């Protein structure tokens, strides 16, 4: 597994036991009731709309754009792989550490992926700008970045974008966790050479339903994405969930406030235990111990996300989701005993 959330693997390794899963970054307030009802009410006896027309119209109205600038897929990962197939870049730059699917999808198409270390605290972010050349076709940016939880500043993005324009490169801007940040400000302003990636999964805790999207003013690219995968990727239940989720602004505001308080609780307590904690702004935190602790935590019923397979990190780094108050307290008590 290169991702968290593998409760099935835990169940096989530990028959009859249950675990608290801090390895998957989902909204701790769960799924809004309106979204649950929309999923349950979706018809099962007909094919879903392969073009997600009603959902895309609703998204376009909310975001003051045209439906033709939006593509919906079976989660953000599906959209990433389709983008790799549609763009087929020869050379791409991916920061390290960051989400593994960018490199996996790009290498599948034969793309040369250049990993550029920006550091756990993005202290070497300028190296990313310096790595862009006229041979660069695509630059992947994640804000807030997974697993660091740090956002890219407007100044940093503007610097990358200016260099990308000089070299004719496209930017993939992943803001899948953006709506759970305390200040959910997007860096996307509708440039034709910037592709915005988003997801309903994390914000509304619907990972099983699978609903992601991208936006681009390059309408030819949006059209091409439909030919880069199977036609009925987004189920009717997922489309219904997305329609309902678009109306959940109050839920998101409440979630952001809750996450901010719990994030501060975790940061202060983890640091008091001697862990290094990156000041992330999302619903997860990147931490470092003096030794690998993930296996020991699992033995006590806590799943952490080992960061050993993130480029630039090792097994002393781990990522935790910000969960409910009681669950976070259990985590701290468990770590006190390690």
Image: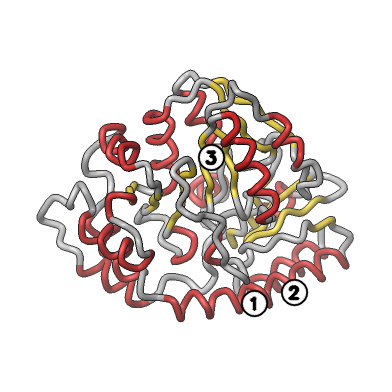
- x, y (%) of residue 308? 71, 38
Q: CA distance from mark 1 to mark 2?
A: 9 Å
* Circle 3 residue: 171
Q: Are marks 1 and 2 in contact (CB under 8 Å)?
A: yes
Q: Residue at the location (35% across, 68% down)?
A: 62
What residue did someone put label 2 on?
A: 265
Taking depth in this image into account, of 139 and 212 the one nearest to the observer is 139
Q: Nearer the viewer, residue 164 or 276?
A: 164
In the rendered view of the protein, which quadrant contains the C terminus? bottom right
- Residue 149 appears in the rendering: no
Q: Which residue is mark 1?
A: 325
Residue 275 in the image: above or below residue 128: below
- What is the secondary structure assignment of the residue under circle 2? helix
Label 1 sits on a secondary structure element that is helix
Q: Are marks 2 and 3 in contact (CB under 8 Å)?
A: no
Tally of numbered tags = 3
Observer able to see residue 202: yes
Residue at 25% in and 61% down: 57
Residue 76 falls left or right of residue 56: right
């Amino acid at each position: 597994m290169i991702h968290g959330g593998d409760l099935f693997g835990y169940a096989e390794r530990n028959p009859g036991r249950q675990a608290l899963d801090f390895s998957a970054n989902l909204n701790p307030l769960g799924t809004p009731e309106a979204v649950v009802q929309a999923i349950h009410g979706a018809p099962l006896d007909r094919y879903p709309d392969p073009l997600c027309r009603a959902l895309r119209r609703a998204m376009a109205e909310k975001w003051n754009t045209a439906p033709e600038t939006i593509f919906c897929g079976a989660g953000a990962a599906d959209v990433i792989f389709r983008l790799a197939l549609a763009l087929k870049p020869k050379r791409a730059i991916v920061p390290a550490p960051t989400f593994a699917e960018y490199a996996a999808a790009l290498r599948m198409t034969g793309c040369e992926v250049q990993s550029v270390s920006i550091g756990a605290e993005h202290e070497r972010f300028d190296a990313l700008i310096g790595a862009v050349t006229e041979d660069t076709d695509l630059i992947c940016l994640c804000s807030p970045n997974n697993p660091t939880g740090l956002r890219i500043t407007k100044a940093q993005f503007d610097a990358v974008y200016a260099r990308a324009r000089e070299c004719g490169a496209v930017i993939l801007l992943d803001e899948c966790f953006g709506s759970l940040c305390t200040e959910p400000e997007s860096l996307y302003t509708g440039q034709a050479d910037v592709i915005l990636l988003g997801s309903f999964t994390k914000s509304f805790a619907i990972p099983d339903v699978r609903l992601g999207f991208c936006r681009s003013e390059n309408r030819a690219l949006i059209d091409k994405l439909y030919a880069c995968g199977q036609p009925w990727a987004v189920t009717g239940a997922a489309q219904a969930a997305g329609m309902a989720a678009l109306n959940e602004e109050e839920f998101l505001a409440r979630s952001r406030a809750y996450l901010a308080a719990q994030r501060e609780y975790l940061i202060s307590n983890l640091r008091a235990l001697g862990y290094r904690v990156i000041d992330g702004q999302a619903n997860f935190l990147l931490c470092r111990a003096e030794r690998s602790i993930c296996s020991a935590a699992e033995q006590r019923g806590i799943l952490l996300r080992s960061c050993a397979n993130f480029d630039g990190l090792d097994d002393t780094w781990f990522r935790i989701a910000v969960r409910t108050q009681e669950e976070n307290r259990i985590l701290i008590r468990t770590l006190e005993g390690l």
